[in-house]
Image (cartoon, rainbow, N blue to C red):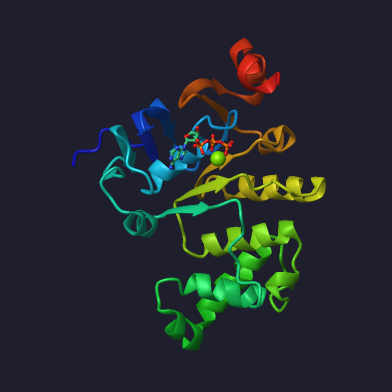
Amino acid sequence: MIPITSSALYLDGITVSFDGFRALNSLSLTMDHGELRAVIGPNGAGKSTMMDVITGKTRPDTGTALFLGQHDLTTLDEATIANLGIGRKFQKPSVIETLSVFENLELALNGRRSPWAAVWHQLSPADLDRIEETLSRVGLDGMGDSRAGLLSHGQKQWLEIGMLLLQSPQVLLVDEPAAGMTDAETQKTADLLRSLAGEHTVIVVEHDMDFVAALACKVTVLHEGRVLAEGSLRQVSANPEVIDVYLGR
Ligand SMILES: Nc1ncnc2c1ncn2[C@@H]1O[C@H](COP(=O)(O)OP(=O)(O)OP(=O)(O)O)[C@@H](O)[C@H]1O
Ligand SMILES: [Mg+2]
């Protein structure tokens, strides 16, 4: 296929209907390489559905969805898209609570091996370095031996982001990471996501406006399945339509 865009992600005219109801209604969104973007909007605006389309969980009725200008995301299955380098973090952490932090990261690194092969696989010095580096990156230095189940809610979210990073995704989709976090954890999460931008293309869906402010990035406001406004948080916050449907509530 001849690339029609050099963007990391290119969505155009994406429509998704559920029994006649349009969850996405001609949605268009473009992400540059290494960009960090916050996506906000009222409940039911289509934010999670947009992530479902990007990850191949939901097929749009119409529209274009390209990864790196060449992979047609509307025709690929979820596993293929994940292997191409699009990773997603759901709101609920999926760490294995009975394993240590280190073991969870080890499993993520070995993601493509069978569980038994992963357990018995001897880590190379390079693997060990990557895990240590990831621990420090997500703010869990020295906590490798801790049981994952004993981590705070925020620490579990960071472990999960670490597990995602070990799969080296080019694009990271993060749905409501700050939900349920303390103010300090929220701030640390914003710092972490900001540090990932540049190297990764990151889309963050969130309702917490203090968190979105801390991300200090371009904001896309979704409403009724389409883009209502785009710009800095300051710009979209001053938009009367955005105030009317979302921020003023
Ligand atoms: N599988 C489905 N079947 C039917 N309707 C669905 C399905 N998935 C989503 N919807 C509907 O599509 C609309 C968009 O939902 P979506 O989950 O994308 O919203 P959202 O912006 O993520 O909202 P929230 O902020 O509450 O997470 C909602 O009205 C929802 O009920
Ligand atoms: Mg959602």
The residue that appears at 51% across and 77% down in the rendered structure is 126
Residue 169 visible in image: yes
Looking at the image, which is closer to me, 76 or 34?
76
Looking at the image, which is closer to me, 58 or 112?
58
- Residue positioned most to the front: 19
33 relative to 80, above or below: above
Residue 8 lies, in percent from the top left, at: 39, 41
Looking at the image, which is closer to me, 174 or 162?
174
- The quadrant in which the C terminus is found is top right
Residue 156 lies, in percent from the top left, at: 68, 62
Looking at the image, which is closer to me, 122 or 119?
119
Q: Is residue 24 left or right of residue 146?
A: left
- The quadrant in which the N terminus is found is top left
Q: Is residue 117 left or right of residue 126?
A: left
Residue 142 lies, in percent from the top left, at: 74, 73
The residue that appears at 65% across and 25% down in the rendered structure is 233
The residue that appears at 74% across and 48% down in the rendered structure is 180
180 relative to 207, above or below: below
Residue 27 visible in image: no
Image quarter for residue 231? top right
The residue that appears at 75% across and 70% down in the rendered structure is 150
- Residue positioned most to the top: 240
Q: How many callouts does the rendering have?
A: 0
99 relative to 55, above or below: below
Residue 141 lies, in percent from the top left, at: 72, 68
Q: Is residue 40 left or right of residue 148?
A: left
